Image (cartoon, rainbow, N blue to C red):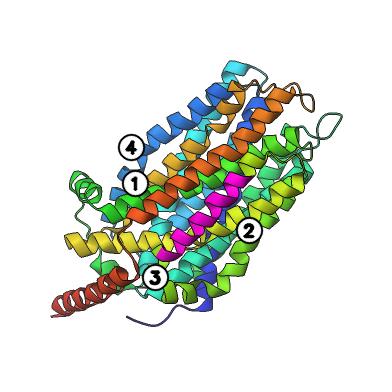
Amino acid sequence: MGEKLSAKNYIGYTICDTANNLAFCVMGTYLATYCTDILGITGAVVTAIFWIARIWDAINDPLMGGIVQRKKPGKGGKYRPFILYAGFPLAVSAVLVYTKFTGNLTFNTIYVAAAYILYGMIYTVLSVPYGSLAMVMTDRENERGNLSVCRAIGGGFGNIPQLLFPLFVMVGGEDGQQMDGQRLFLAMCAVAVLMMLIYIVSYLWTKEKPELVTLSNEEVHITSTLKDIIKDRAFVTMSLIGGLVIAVQLYINSANVYLFKDFYQKSGFSSIYLIISYLPMLIMIPFANKMIRKWGKKEICIAGFSVSAAASLISWLGHFTNVWFYIILAFFVNAGIGFVILEVWAMCGDIVDHQEWVTGKREEATNYAVFTFVRKMGQALAAIVPMLNAMIGYDKNAIGAQTQEVLDGIYNVSTLGPFLMIVLMLALILLYPLDKKKTAQMQQELAERRSEKLSAQDN
């Protein structure tokens, strides 16, 4: 349907998630440590803040999905304008989260909670239209797969702060293993400027296909939509997998700050870990579509989760004091889940299509909002790291001098949690009904229905 996507279109879509993730990865990796070590907030309170933010998302995300779904296309399209409308405020809000005004603990706790919730709300205003945009840029399965890979690549580039921040912000204290709050603030200011520049280019280089926007249902009834989704096994299982895959990523990132800082006392190795963890996905990128055509998405996920589960189990049971053993096993953990990270947005497109297939209604924005809400629940699950570390006796003032019992606890928190989440993903993918054959049947029947609908509209 229509002309193919250009290289510029792919790049424009890619870099938007780079900008999104520049701030998002800092929130997922450093916010817990910033709250405990810089602001002095207890781990339990930090986890409570993250959970309160996610509870608000339970209201915020579906509402935003409904608003976006009802929006009439304007001069810039239906979804593209949000890249600018929300992108600039998102960059500013990310800086506000890491702005410290006073040494008062009560004020800091209330302020960081409010700033983080504001950041999350603006992120939703951007992420729901951005995710929906891929579904109206093309209806070709291979191009949607390419867009999902592009989004994963863009998100990967957005993790650059994880690579550079340890060298810039983890320099406090006598042993250089403590976070420097002022440096973190300055780094976030630089990140915000870069985000704004990227959003401008992304807006200019993406496009929407009017015929696909026309197919979208603008009459939305949230209650009815949610009932349809709850009855859809494909939507439920893949949404849970989407939530768990981001949970395991953020959980590992957050736990690794403590693991490298305290257990290994080598904060700089977090940059090496990041490179190793993304290497499997870089290797996979050129072959992703060929793998899908040969085996199918579900089938590849089953094999991948099995590899990740085995590697994470070895990592937990091995209790390796040599940092290199931990990092080498990380390669295999990430190799297994790497395909889902690359293709999660294409699989999101599949379950949105599945809703259209079984209900006859096209509600990509509302469906996408529900999917992202579940992913935010995954973020809340990852937020349990500071509370778990508090439960094992972590002392923020004992940098480099934690007791052996606490150090062992930090290692177990860092490795057992990912293993359990990956095993759950393996169980869910076995229940996911869209195998290679079923997906092909669905896409063929949808193409016929859409063609008939557009013909009827033209007449």
Find disc 4 in the rendering and name its residue.
59
Find disc 2 in the rendering and name its residue.
278
- C-alpha gap between disc 4 and disc 2: 33 Å
Disc number lying in front (1 or 2): 2
Give the structural element (helix, strand or loop) at label 3: helix
- C-alpha gap between disc 4 and disc 1: 9 Å
Find disc 3 in the rendering and name its residue.
137
Farthest residue, direction bottom: 3
Measured along the vertical axis of the image, is residue 301 above or below residue 118? below
Give the structural element (helix, strand or loop) at label 2: helix
Q: Which residues are magenta?
A: 299-314
* Magenta region includes residue 311: yes
In what quadrant of the picture does the C terminus appear? Answer: bottom left
130 or 285, nearer to the observer: 285
Where does the image place residue 370, in percent across and percent down from the top left?
33, 48
* Magenta region includes residue 23: no
